[in-house]
Image (spheres, rainbow, N blue to C red):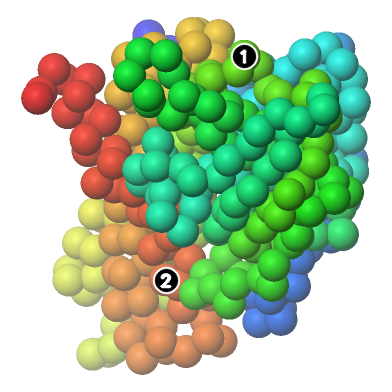
Amino acid sequence: MDFELSEDQRAVRDLCREFAREVVAPAAAELDREERFPYEIVRQMGEMGLFGLPFPEEWGGAGADFPSYCIAVEEISRADAGVGITLEAAVSLGAAPIHEFGSREQKERWLPDLLSGRRLWAFGLTEPQAGSDAAATRTRARLSDGEWVIHGAKQFITNAGTDISAGVTISAITGEHPDGGRPEISAILVPREAPGYEVLPAYRKLGWRCSDTHPLAFDACRVPEANLLGRRGGGLQQFLHTLTGGRIAIAALCVGLAQACLDAALAYASERTAFGQRLSRLQAIQFKLADMATEVELARTMTYRAAVAYQRSEGRATGEVRKLAAMAKLFASETSKRAADQAVQIHGGYGFIEDYPVARYWRNVKVNEIGEGTSEVQRLLIARELGCG
């Protein structure tokens, strides 16, 4: 049992930490205030190879392991979670399904641009009536003259409406199973230029304000039959598989954000004085900082454990991997929320002022318990793998 990072993993961590500190962090407050997508930062991350980290060199990737990618997400998110989710969604939800399930022609068409960061791909599972209940999708696609004709809507879709967004993988009902009429759900690749594809106005969000999030509408949207991703009827399983890796990466994002909360709280407590001494010398504050540091370290260890298990399974979402992914996402997301709350508390009134980064951290943490599976869903998944029910 070895808890040390490899030489390559340390190199990724150091590279991303320096970039986050020197490039991302100085721009974070302004990007958040202006709700502006970080095109220049995305371009630089692409040049650094971050969008291709866990993918083979054959398709333009860096050939690194999955834990290295999670370390990159953690370090970028430590500077800004909005930039972190842009990277995570582009890799785990955008490029990964195409690499995992796509035909050679699909990979050749889209992966080079996606793994270089020149273009972004989105993941369209959630609908107005289908969030945690992913099988309740209402979007439909029927074959007509060699094309899929799609009708429906998706919501809360990351990286769907930028100037470099290339398209989205959607789940859609393509028929019924012969075993009793269950909906047949398939995954379909829908490029941005497809007729009938509409990107609706962006959401006004509480947090992750520099990331791109839009609802999408499909009105008789037409794409070639060859844009089916994987086997027909396998869409729901493919999407749930994709979410397993995505949850581990989201856990890494949460660890980075929780670490940022601890960094800010510790720095403030070391400078601010009260009752004739620094806050960091007051036992009440020391206990808060100690608890934060302990939980952050536990969340990091849990996330790395899940990332290693995912890597060793070669991306197969086994029961053990699903359980570890759910545990990591659950604990890390709730850790980040507690860390942000305590960071604001330690800052006192200043924590409530947007001039201090902890106010932004506090706004960013809540969605961690919702996106890519709510905390309630994670607990259900864990219980299921424990054999409950």
* Residue 203 image offset from top left, x and y in percent: 60, 72
Q: Secondary structure at mark 2?
A: helix
* Above or below 61: residue 170: below
* Residue 294 image offset from top left, x and y in percent: 28, 46
**Quadrant housing the N terminus:** top left
Q: Amino acid at mark 1?
A: Arg
- Compared across the picture, whether 16 is left or right of 284 comes to right
* Above or below 32: residue 296: above
Q: What crowding class fits label 1: few (fewer than 14 Cα within 10 Å), some (14-19), or many (20 or more)?
A: few
Q: Which label belongs to residue 201?
A: none
Count of numbered circles on the image: 2
Question: Outermost residue toward the left?
Answer: 389
Residue drawn at (24%, 46%) of the image: 376
Q: Nearer the viewer, residue 151 or 313?
A: 151
Whether residue 118 is visible, yes or no, is yes
Residue drawn at (53%, 34%) of the image: 173
Residue drawn at (48%, 66%) of the image: 364
Say which residue label 2 marks: 362
* Mark 2 and mark 1: Cα distance apart in space: 42 Å
**Mark in front: 2 vs 1:** 1
Q: Nearer the viewer, residue 116 or 353?
A: 116
**Quadrant housing the C terminus:** top left
Q: Secondary structure at mark 1?
A: loop
Q: Nearer the viewer, residue 13 or 101?
A: 101
The picture quadrant where one finds residue 142 is top right
Q: Which label belongs to residue 231?
A: 1
Q: Amino acid at mark 2?
A: Trp
The picture quadrant where one finds residue 279 is bottom left
Q: Earlier in the sequence, mark 2 or mark 1?
A: 1
Residue drawn at (53%, 19%) of the image: 234
